[in-house]
Image (spheres, rainbow, N blue to C red):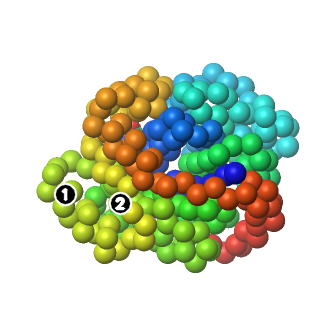
């Protein structure tokens, strides 16, 4: 039984990767979780998960050179599938193969989290949002970030992907929080999953190569991620149905 979530934002730097790993660790307390770096052109899960030195990544799997199992690493209670960062690796990888990779991982896990590319401007970039059951929208409490997040939501809904909710990250003041709930309710489907503060713990965690929840488990940010994970209300579709959907999905030519 599995549910696949795309963690997406429309903009880089909002905290998708930070949030993917933090939510993944929180969910791993109750579920078997697989986190996939689907941001294959701008991968960075490996730096956030202390996997800098590994040889085999999603790039080699997408290039047809390695089986998917060779790129699955057990870290922090999750199965982590990192992607390489070299341009050559990206050029050799066939993005469309991601469908088969996710389909085969779906057969043996409870939750898949797809750390998604920022923009929705290429076939590679839209894959996670198109194929996931639900999208978790990560945004900062600023107008440009909100407007990009709305595009992600619109895109997801157009392709039949539901919105699990929105997660505000890098929130700096309390005043913003009341505005945030208002905006979340007015503009977005799904729940307000959490408001994660701007915190030095996030940067320190990345430097340490650890998910935020591993680095600062008692921090306010970690608590927000745990609460967000609880309110996701995971729905388990049949693994076969999810795998079939990924394998046979038609990827839009013109996103
Ligand atoms: N809540 C936060 N407070 C402070 N810095 C953060 C926070 N969330 C993320 N960051 C930092 O912002 C940068 C971008 O975060 P990242 O998760 O890589 O974003 P994305 O994957 O959306 O590009 C990283 O250096 C990260 O450590
Ligand atoms: Mg990222």
Q: Identify which residue, 83 or 71, lies in the foreground.
A: 71
Q: Distance between the residues labelled 2 and 1?
A: 14 Å
Q: Is residue 139 visible from the viewing direction of this image?
A: no
In the picture provided, is 133 more to the left or to the right than 9? right
Residue located beneath label 2 in the image: 192
Q: Is residue 28 above or below residue 251?
A: above
Q: Identify which residue, 230 or 98, lies in the foreground.
A: 230
**Residue drawn at x 66%, y 63% as measured from the top left:** 131
Q: Which of marks 2 and 1 is nearer the N terminus?
A: 1
Q: Identify which residue, 105 or 239, lies in the foreground.
A: 239
Classify the position of ligand 1 by quadrant: top left, top right, bottom left or bottom right.
top left
**Residue drawn at x 48%, y 62% as measured from the top left:** 164
SS assignment at label 1: helix
SS assignment at label 2: strand
Q: How many marks?
A: 2
Q: Is residue 236 above or below residue 32?
A: below
In the picture provided, is 46 more to the left or to the right than 154? right
Q: Is residue 49 above or below residue 247?
A: above
Q: Identify which residue, 42 or 26, lies in the foreground.
A: 26
- The image position of residue 72, as x and y in percent, is 71, 33
- The image position of residue 145, as x and y in percent, is 36, 62
In this view, the residue farthest toward the left is 175
In the picture provided, is 134 more to the left or to the right than 81? left
In the picture provided, is 160 more to the left or to the right than 206? right
Residue located beneath label 1 in the image: 176
Q: In this view, does 14 lie above or below 181?
A: above
Dividing the picture into quadrants, the one containing residue 237 is bottom right
**Residue drawn at x 63%, y 60% as measured from the top left:** 132
Please tell me whether mark 2 or mark 1 is closer to you in this view.
2
- The image position of residue 127, as x and y in percent, is 66, 61
């Amino acid at each position: 039984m599995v549910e696949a979530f795309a963690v997406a934002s429309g903009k880089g730097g909002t905290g998708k990767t930070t949030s993917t790993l933090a939510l993944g660790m929180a969910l791993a307390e109750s579920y078997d979780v697989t986190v996939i770096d689907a941001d294959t052109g701008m991968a960075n899960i490996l730096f956030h998960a202390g996997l800098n030195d590994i040889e085999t990544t999603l790039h080699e799997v997408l290039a047809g050179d390695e089986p998917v199992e060779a790129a699955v690493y057990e870290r922090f209670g999750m199965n982590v599938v990192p992607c390489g960062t070299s341009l050559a690796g990206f050029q050799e990888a066939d993005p469309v193969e991601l469908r088969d990779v996710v389909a085969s991982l779906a057969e043996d896990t409870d939750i898949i989290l797809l750390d998604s590319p920022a923009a929705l401007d290429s076939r590679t970039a839209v894959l996670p949002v198109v194929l996931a059951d639900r999208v978790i929208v990560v945004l900062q409490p600023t107008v440009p970030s909100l407007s990009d997040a709305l595009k992600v939501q619109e895109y997801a809904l157009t392709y039949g992907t539901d919105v699990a909710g929105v997660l505000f990250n890098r929130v700096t003041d309390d005043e913003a929080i009341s505005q945030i709930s208002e905006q979340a309710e007015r503009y977005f489907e799904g729940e307000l999953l959490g408001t994660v503060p701007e915190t030095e713990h996030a940067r320190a965690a990345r430097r340490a190569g650890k998910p935020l929840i591993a680095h600062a488990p008692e921090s306010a940010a970690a608590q927000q991620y745990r609460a967000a994970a609880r309110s996701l209300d995971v729905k388990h579709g049949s693994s076969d149905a999810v795998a079939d959907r990924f394998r046979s999905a038609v990827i839009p030519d013109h996103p």
